[in-house]
Amino acid sequence: MGQILLLIELKGGNDGLNTLVPYADPRYRELRAGIGVARERILPLDEKVGLHDKLEPLLDSWNAGDFAILQGVGYPYPNRSHFRSIEIWDTASAASQTLSEGWIAQAFQATHLPQGAAVDAIVADTNALPMTGPALRTIVMQDAENFLRQAGAMKDTAGMSDDGNPALRHLLGVRREINAAAAGLRDRLRATPSPTYAYSQDNGLGRQLDLATRLLAAKVPVVAIKLALGGFDTHANQAPTHERLLGILAAGLAALRKNLIAADLWNDVVVMSYSEFGRRVRQNASGGTDHGTAAPQFVLGGGVKGGLYGVYPSLTDLQDGDLKHSIDFRSVFATLAQGCWGLQRDFGLRQPQRLGFLA
Amino acid sequence: MFFRLSRRGFVAAGVSLPAMGWSGWGVHAAVPMGFDQARSLLSRTAFGATPDEIRALEAQDYESAVDRLLGNFRPQAATPAPAWIDLGPAEVRRQQRAAEAGRKPGVDGKPLQIARPVQEQGRELRNWWVEEMLVTDQPLVERMVLFWHNHFTSSMLKVRYAPAMFRQNALFRREALGNFRILFKAVARDPAMLIYLDGIRSVADEPNENFARELLELFTLGEGHYSEADIKAAARAFTGRTIDRETGGFVDRPQRHDDGEKTFLGRTGRFGGDEIVDILLAHPRTAETIVEKMWREFVSLKPDTAEIRRLAASFRSGGYEIRPLLRSLLLSRAFRDPGNRGSLIKSPVELIVGTVRVLGLPVQEKTQLVRMMQGLGQVPFDPPNVKGWAGGESWITTYTLLLRQQFLRRIVEATTVAPMEPGINMAARSNRRAERRQQMPPDEGSVQMMEPARPVEGRSLRNAGTAARLGPGLGSADSATLIRALLPRPPIDRVDASRAPGEVVAAVLLDPAYQLK
């Protein structure tokens, strides 16, 4: 059924302005006098915006037309706290609202998922909030070997009585879920070969992409997989850190694309990057940037219609020194729910925008 | 609710006592409570219980024991406070900026790791509280401090000013079992709370509704018992409350306060914050909200609405004294019902602190424990959002259950017992703890024992056989007693009571029933 959504959380708040650079805007040079990306290091996508040259590995995808960039994604009344803002994203909340269930779990409420491998979503990062909720059986595992070993140490609970104690019933139920997921994954993963193109093992994202590729190749019937790359909270001396992270992201995504094309899986997957917020337009006194608001999001996949979506937020019409969003992230989620899983969801928006980046 | 006795007769000892005496009816006679009841009481009011602690209680009369448990307590922590608690916000910010500015890239382009004061103080603060939970001789106070922290939430992640978080913790400790009215009024002036819910920004011209909204929705009435207009009125009433930039203390700025007329929950007047608190304290829902939470924390995940209303009414009419409320809960039929044992799930803090305490493990570096708490979803001073930790069944997910097992397995396999060899390294270890003990105010009846023999890192509990040396709390007990002391109900997996005590403890810690209390 449908496509598998592969989320990549860029933790700490990715600087959108130095990712997709509005190079033609003189305000950019003015506000980013020290840390702005030099003109010769920008890969222009049109006459206004271009990618940081560390993202060069993604040009294949751009040229093939399966790389969409959503510009100015954010939400009204932006919150600039890391933990609160990522919670707003992960639960598709309004800024004034505290929800506890993740947006993917919300999307699958009252649907019937096939029992399959006894797992509906896999998180290779530590934050499982987007897929947390009663509708999904979500497993968090940093690596498959370790998970299977740990699950193997846990005894089977089949047929055990909970003596009418709800806490014990819950505990035994969770243990059964772990056992079932391990049983479902064990044989599938054992039969799966290593990815054709190796991922860099010097960073967490490479290892997570390796796991994701194996899970996809093993055809584990999940609806979503979540990975993460951390370190984007660049308050001081931003440039070297940010460049390094963009390089890791681009190399990882390019290798993922090659692997999935080779395995004939590229049409079955939609990859999306996101971050809790972008960064302040004007750089700070420490050669870094502080917490901001709207930022671009990447979406890739065989079924993705490449190109730029939305409008780049104005660098002159700011709110409290920050960009005004032009796409509400919940419209992105609504588009994904429809495109990946055929689910019509509005995530609390009266009229979610149909963004059209999925066929 | 009916009494359910295990087929194995596990909980059978001492359960035939009717729950009596709490409301004054019937003649109260002193009756020994028995091992399982003593265990149950301790498991929900302390951080774990050793066989010796349970035995010390089992011969006592239940009601008298509860009264002793709720007796006098020290309103300060025993662990020495971190050095920076008197720093003002301006000074902390200056230090932070200085540290950030000095940040240089390393050879590989990654910024060098530097100690940033805000983060460093946050780490010391968490370690300080974990240390206090590990050494305290009044664990019930710590549990109540955690309870109030989870009710009147503030998070270091937002507040970013550790001295205020420390002072808020001191407030919770002072009123842990004191008076809710006093606590509530103090919280509404508390600097950490003012930062956390944007009270410091709330002025007459532009009232910020964050605190007012959570005040009504989460701290007192609950959804459905107020209107948006009530939130706006309350927000106006609290305007002008802020903190002093130099000291970080509370200040009232009358010129920024909106002293106009407000209508709040049907009453009209030129209310300030204290009047809003008084109106909320007069509303039955405020007491019900607190009692519902206490019920979930101490008694059961299943609310008994009629009983909660009754207890809330007397909480309110009795002037919001916390101690009598907790007494009623501990003496309630539901609490004492043997069928109710093992029906609560240990929080990450309880699991980790309780395990370390019961095994008597030496912990030099608290950061490791905090990291584990983070993995399991409960970092002290960092609740996930203003609602606090949801607790209950949400503590256990596929992820956290595996991590809990991993933590316990690590304790079983590597961190525990070996026969102690004289001299090695132990002097340094025990001295640190002994020093701390000496720094506690002299207190008659508190634990002032010499540093006892304690387990050390080395061989696995599981296969050390009879050579396994358990900590002082467990060392003297036989295998069958250890099972009964460490689990609230019979083991789920098989635990062979004929094995050596070390092996039995290893099996018991990994049993699912160990997650329950």
Image: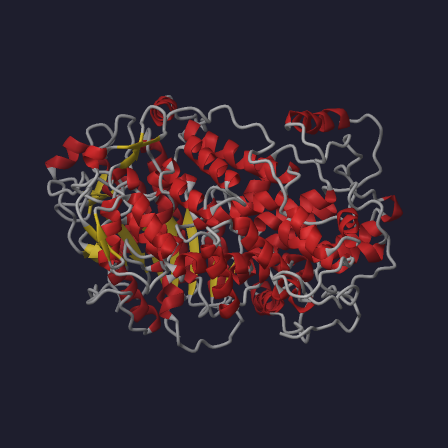
Q: Quadrant of the C terminus of chain B?
A: bottom right
Q: Is residue B465 left or right of residue A43?
A: right
Residue A279 in which image quadrant: top left
| Near-viewer residue (B483 or A289) | B483
Relative image position of residue B418 (x, y in whole percent): 81, 39
- Which residue appears at 54% of the width and 45% of the height? B177
Relative image position of residue B153 (x, y in whole percent): 42, 47
Relative image position of residue A157 (x, y in whole percent): 67, 70
Count of picture labels: 0
Location of residue A330 with respect to A163 vertically, above or below = above
Residue B150 visible in the snapshot: yes
Residue B362 in which image quadrant: top right
Residue B489 in which image quadrant: bottom right
Q: Is residue B18 left or right of residue A135?
A: right
- Which residue appears at 39% of the width and 76% of the height? A110
- Which residue appears at 43% of the width and 53% of the height? A227
Q: Quadrant of the N terminus of chain B?
A: bottom right
Report the coloring of the rendering: secondary structure
| Near-viewer residue (B230 or A229) | B230
Q: Is residue B94 left or right of residue B369?
A: left
- Which residue appears at 76% of the width and 51% of the height? B57
Residue A268 visible in the snapshot: no
Location of residue A230 with respect to B232 vertically, above or below = above
Relative image position of residue B516 (x, y in whole percent): 64, 59
